[in-house]
Structure formats: C-alpha cells, structure tokens
Amino acid sequence: MGGLSADKRERLKALAKGDFLQSSDPAIDAFLKRMESEGAPVFSDVYSGEMSFYNAPRKSELADMDVAVVGVPFEASAPVRAGTRLGPRSFREWSKVRGPIHDAWNTIPFDLCSVADHGDVVFDSPHDVDACIARIADVYAGFRGAGVAPLSVGGVHTMTHPILKGLAAGEPVGLVQIDAHADTARGSFQGNLLNDCSVFLNAALDEAIDPERTIQIGIRGSLSAYWDFSRESGMRVMPMAEVYEAGVSGVLDEIRRVIGDGPFYLTLDTDGIDATYLPGTQLPEPFGLTTREVLLILRGLRGMDMVGADIVELCPPYDPNGISANTSAALGFEMLCLLAEAHVGRHGENRKTHWT
Ligand SMILES: [Mn+2]
C-alpha cells in the first residue's frame, strides 16, 4: 500500500498551481480579474468594511444605474411579529457571501448591468403607515422614470403596493406572488385601508397590477377564507394543496399561462416558504414550499420579462442563527440574475457594474 504514483502526484501539483481569482472559463476569468483590479470587496474579509447588497457599489444617483438593490426598513402595519425593519440590514450581511456568479447558469449580473446598492428608503415618519406608503411610491416612481429595475428587501409586505404603484404608473403589470397569504382582504384592518392583509387588492385598485395576469402561489393556513377578492377579480390562486399535486412543473405551466410575454413583477413573501426552512418571518406558516421548490420556480422564470422583484417579511429577531436571512439572500441572488438578464433583454445593451 503506497501513496500516489509519482506521475499522479506531479499531475495534481501542476493542476493546483495558479491564483484564487482565476477560472478556466474566459468570461468568468475576465470578470474575476476586473473585480480584483477595481478593488471590488467580494473576497475581502467578510467581517470588515462596509456592508452592501451583494457587494455592489453604493450609489444613489440613478443616471448610471440599471438594477438597484434597495432596502425598505418599513414595519408599520405589521400585524404579528415585530422586527421586519431589521430585514435589510440582516440581508445585506448575508448577501456578502452570495454571488457574484450564478452557480448553474454562470450568469454574472455585474457584467450584464450596472448594479448598485441604492441604500435604504428613508422614512421621516416611520410609524405613519400612509406617509411611508406615499414615500415608497415616490421613490419607485423615480426608478420607473430612470428605467431602473429594483430588487427590494423588506420590510413588511405592505410595501409592495406602493412599489407597484410607483413602477406601474397606471400601466398595470403582471404579478407572480409566492406567499402563504393572498393579501387581498377587503375593508380596513387595524384601522387602515392600506394594510398588510390588503396589499394586492390595493395594487389592483390603483391599476398597478392586472388581476387577470396575477398568480398567487402557496396560499394556505388560517387566513385562507379572506381572499374572495382574489378569486372574484380573476387572480389565479394556487393554494398549497394544489401545489402539492401539480409540483414545480405544474406551477411553472400556470405561471407562463397567466403571465404570458408581458412585463411582470415578482414578490416573494418569506412566509410562502415552509416555516421549517425559514422561521424568521413575520407570520410563519407551516406546510409551505421548500427552499428547493422556490429555487426551481424562480429559475423557471428565466427568459420572462421581469421588471422588478422583492423579498419581504424577513424578521431577524426570530432568525438568531441567520438561516432565514441567508436563504433569502441566496434566493435574492437568483432574482438579481433574472432582473439583469431581463433588463438586457428589454434594452438590448449591457453596461457593466464598476467599483471604481
Ligand atoms: Mn404577504
């Protein structure tokens, strides 16, 4: 019983020569070299320096931006657990170790688009629901005006209504919603018409989404009786019981049928994912989608015209080991790749992200 043959040992030693930032794929290799020359913080010490979403450069000026990653630390109107306003901070930390290259597609969003961490939406009156909603709509109208596709990190789901309102500006988009709750309750809740249970009813009334191009996936749990507006307005409600039967491919068939070729927005409520996998959410629901199923659904959206996306309801006080933020950041990177590819598809050009 000897060790390796001399030949084999020499061959392995020869293969091990080279640098960490080096790849046999020319596109990846060029990107790694570019990141290094621009001082991108991707491989710097994880525990030092400024945190930014996916290590993207921090920028507020929209002129040179294609895709903005935006924190929305908004939690007024959260009916159950407190702490969603800490979501963007926790997500930033975990996104530090997610990306920059898609592991299955080799997509590099930073080579396709000018991506930036746009910072957080700042609220002058963070406990005033209506004021926060007006502020969010205003910020996202700015993104629409500048042709910037936003990836937003919440924050309570209530935020998605003004995001859609700002982005759509009266031209309703389609909606893919992964969520335990359809969020289309009628009337006011806890004293406010604009609330966490009526997000997509309000988006439909404001002509920000087309109910007939809306699909709600993973609906389940004790609130399920309150979503008549979804069904009666023509939204495709796909409850969890149906998802169990249809599987990922059946879900994707329905998404493509409902959304078609037109523009659409993706919203992922973290409670759509089974609470076993993602406990750190405002209102956890058991019996939901696995992280693998959500991953495959997102990957199935490749090639479609996504104009924006968000991940909401991350609740770090209930996520002490970071597992929920880590999973959210990983799924967010999938969205970042989809948004970058869709942006190139829409504009037919690409413009790289630069760190200098
Ligand atoms: Mn929701």
Image (cartoon, rainbow, N blue to C red):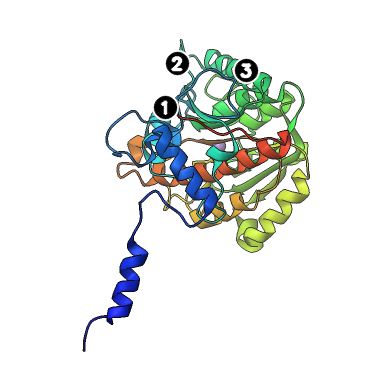
* Residue wearing tag 2: 126
- Please tell me the numbered disc located at residue 142: 3
Tell me if label 1 and label 2 are in contact, CB under 8 Å: yes
* Residue wearing tag 1: 85
- Please tell me the numbered disc located at residue 330: none
Pointer 3 or 1: first along the chain: 1
Q: Residues within 10 Å of mark 3 (few under 14, many from 20)?
A: some
The amino acid on which the numbered mark 2 sits, given as a three-letter code, is: Pro
Q: CA distance from mark 3 to mark 1?
A: 22 Å
Q: Is mark 3 within 8 Å of ligand 1?
A: no
Query: Which quadrant holds residue 131?
Result: top right
- Comparing labels 3 and 1, the label whose residue is closer to the camera: 3
Secondary element under disc 1, as helix, strand or loop, is: helix
The amino acid on which the numbered mark 1 sits, given as a three-letter code, is: Arg
The answer to whether residue 293 is left or right of residue 146 is: left
Whether residue 179 is visible, yes or no, is no
Pointer 2 or 3: first along the chain: 2
**Which residue is located at x 59 percent, y 35 percent?**
113
